[in-house]
Image (cartoon, grey):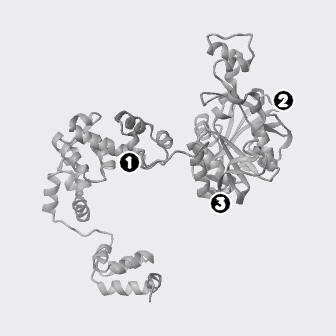
């Protein structure tokens, strides 16, 4: 018995060319598909389309043109029966292709149909009722809205409006597995389904998230698992309770914690939370596992980019020696770092020196220096405050090339222990000076609040009932702000 694979292997480029020559004369590739589907499938599979086109062209054919399905008179008749140019394209594609093959598209445009801005109410209602009979309603109803304007609902029967909107809600819900995921990804559709009373119906296929796991954590786990199939969830690395991690990649000895602000602040366990994240990181390090902590308020795209680079699986790889170094203006540097750095651009914008690495005129990496008088540099002249490459991109040698344009003087910098081990600073020639205790920021109802908001000068302006007798933490806690602790920072000095 001959298998399908053996049949496929029996086709060669020479055999395809022989079959094509036997079909001559031919007009184009579409004619081959109609007369001999097996040959057409083989030529596509063996990637010999260009060779076949040359055979057709050598025998007087035009392989890049479509078959003319309609006469010009028939095309004009169909065209004049449409209410808009988009309707002609959407509902009569054979006529559209035929007009293109004839080179008569400009003649159609000159007939004035493309100048009609809106459909008539009757035509729109008919179009809406036709949408109710096929699944393409989800994409095509946006075309309807475009032609009828912002008040498109008033032009249609209520039944058509309900059908179109309900289908849009159902389509959005069908792409989600959990109700919270639906609420996060499509908040407008979620609220509309709730108002219409169809929320339970459109969410009937969804399952509740696993106990003690947020939707964000589940989505992050599935992203990591798509990169590394051996990824595991909720793993105990030892008998120590502190060694339980949300995500673990055995092949890379990498563990990931996704921390919601509300549940990882001092709101529930008080000052005990100060050391929880650092102790868990040390427990993992004792088992030669690198642990990374991410906060719920950080951008998903940046988190994915950091994880990709940690697993040595970026989407793009570039070489810094092929790029060009140039100064970067503040607006460009801010937009780039806000998009690519996990902490964004930060403050002290008007005093910074920003250096960028360009490839073919496109900015791919930025390094930013700030005078140390604005960063408590403790005797250093400058602070290296930011370095980032484009999302999902690894540029070998980028940091070294950009650092070669550093300002003169002593430079200080800090690496975040919850994400990085500081190996890059050693490559650049920095000396490790010390490690600081865990630092903090604030959260209120699960929303990130910078540490600087806890200054007494700021609290006096923020809180009407400010009391000078209370210390910072008491003052903030009395207004619903609680501290969230990180894993400390490592100080590096270049002299």
Figure check: 209 above or below 155: below
The residue positioned 33% from the left and 49% from the top of the image is 139
Looking at the image, do the residues carrying marks 1 and 2 touch, with CB atoms under 8 Å apart? no
Q: Secondary structure at mark 3?
A: loop
Mark 2 or 3, which is nearer the eye? 3
The residue that label 3 is drawn on is 230
The residue that label 2 is drawn on is 378
Residue 180 — which label?
none
Q: Secondary structure at mark 1?
A: helix
The residue positioned 72% from the left and 18% from the top of the image is 474
Mark 1 vs 2, N-terminal side: 1
Mark 1 vs 3, N-terminal side: 1
Mark 1 or 2, which is nearer the eye? 1
The residue carrying pointer 1 sits among few (fewer than 14), some (14 to 19) or many (20 or more) residues within 10 Å by Cα, namely: some
Residue 171 — which label?
1
The residue positioned 72% from the left and 44% from the top of the image is 419
Looking at the image, do the residues carrying marks 2 and 3 touch, with CB atoms under 8 Å apart? no
Q: Is residue 73 visible?
A: yes
Q: Is residue 407 visible?
A: no
CA gap between label 1 and label 2 equals: 57 Å
The residue nearer to you, when weighing 198 against 440, is 198
The residue carrying pointer 3 sits among few (fewer than 14), some (14 to 19) or many (20 or more) residues within 10 Å by Cα, namely: few
């Amino acid at each position: 018995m001959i298998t399908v694979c053996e049949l496929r292997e029996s086709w060669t480029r020479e055999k395809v060319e022989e079959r094509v020559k036997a079909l001559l004369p031919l007009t184009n590739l579409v004619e081959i598909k109609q007369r001999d589907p097996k040959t057409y499938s083989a030529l596509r599979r063996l990637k010999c389309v260009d060779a076949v086109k040359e055979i057709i062209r050598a025998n007087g054919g035009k392989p890049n043109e479509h078959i003319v399905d309609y006469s010009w008179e028939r095309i004009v008749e169909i065209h004049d029966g449409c209410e808009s140019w988009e309707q002609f394209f959407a509902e009569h594609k054979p006529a559209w292709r035929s007009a293109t093959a004839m080179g008569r598209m400009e003649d159609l445009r000159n007939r004035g149909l493309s100048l009609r801005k809106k459909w008539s109410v009757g035509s729109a209602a008919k179009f809406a009722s036709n949408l109710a009979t096929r699944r393409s309603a989800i994409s095509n109803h946006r075309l309807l809205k475009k032609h009828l304007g912002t008040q498109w609902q008033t032009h249609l029967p209520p039944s058509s409006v309900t059908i179109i909107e309900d289908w849009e809600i159902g389509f959005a819900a069908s792409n989600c597995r959990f109700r919270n995921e639906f609420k996060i990804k499509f908040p407008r559709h979620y609220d509309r389904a709730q108002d219409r009373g169809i929320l339970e119906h459109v969410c009937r296929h969804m399952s509740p998230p696993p106990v003690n796991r947020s939707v964000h954590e589940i989505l992050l786990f599935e992203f990591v698992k798509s990169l590394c199939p051996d990824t595991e969830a909720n793993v105990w690395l030892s008998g120590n309770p502190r060694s339980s991690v949300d995500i673990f990649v055995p092949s890379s000895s990498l563990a990931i914690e996704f921390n919601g602000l509300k549940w990882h602040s001092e709101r529930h366990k008080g000052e005990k939370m100060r050391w929880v994240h650092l102790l868990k990181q040390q427990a993992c390090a004792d088992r030669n596992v690198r642990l990374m902590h991410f906060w719920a308020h950080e951008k998903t795209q940046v988190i994915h980019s950091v994880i990709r680079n940690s697993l040595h699986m970026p989407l793009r790889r570039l070489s810094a020696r092929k790029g060009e170094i140039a100064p970067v203006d503040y607006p460009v540097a801010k937009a780039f770092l806000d998009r690519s750095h996990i902490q964004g651009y930060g403050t002290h914008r008007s005093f910074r020196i920003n250096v960028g690495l360009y490839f073919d005129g496109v900015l791919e990496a930025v390094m930013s220096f700030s005078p140390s008088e604005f960063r408590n540099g403790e005797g250093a002249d400058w602070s290296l405050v930011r370095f980032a490459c484009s999302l999902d991109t690894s540029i070998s040698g980028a940091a070294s090339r950009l650092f070669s344009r550093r300002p003169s003087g002593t430079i200080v910098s800090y690496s975040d222990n919850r994400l990085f081990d500081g190996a890059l600073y050693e490559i650049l020639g920095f000396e490790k000076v010390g490690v600081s205790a865990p630092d903090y920021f604030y959260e209120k109802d699960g929303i990130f609040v910078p540490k600087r908001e806890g200054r007494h000068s700021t609290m006096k302006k923020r809180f009407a009932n400010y009391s000078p007798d209370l210390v910072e933490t008491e003052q903030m806690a009395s207004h619903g702000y609680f501290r969230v602790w990180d894993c400390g920072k490592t100080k590096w000095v270049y002299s």
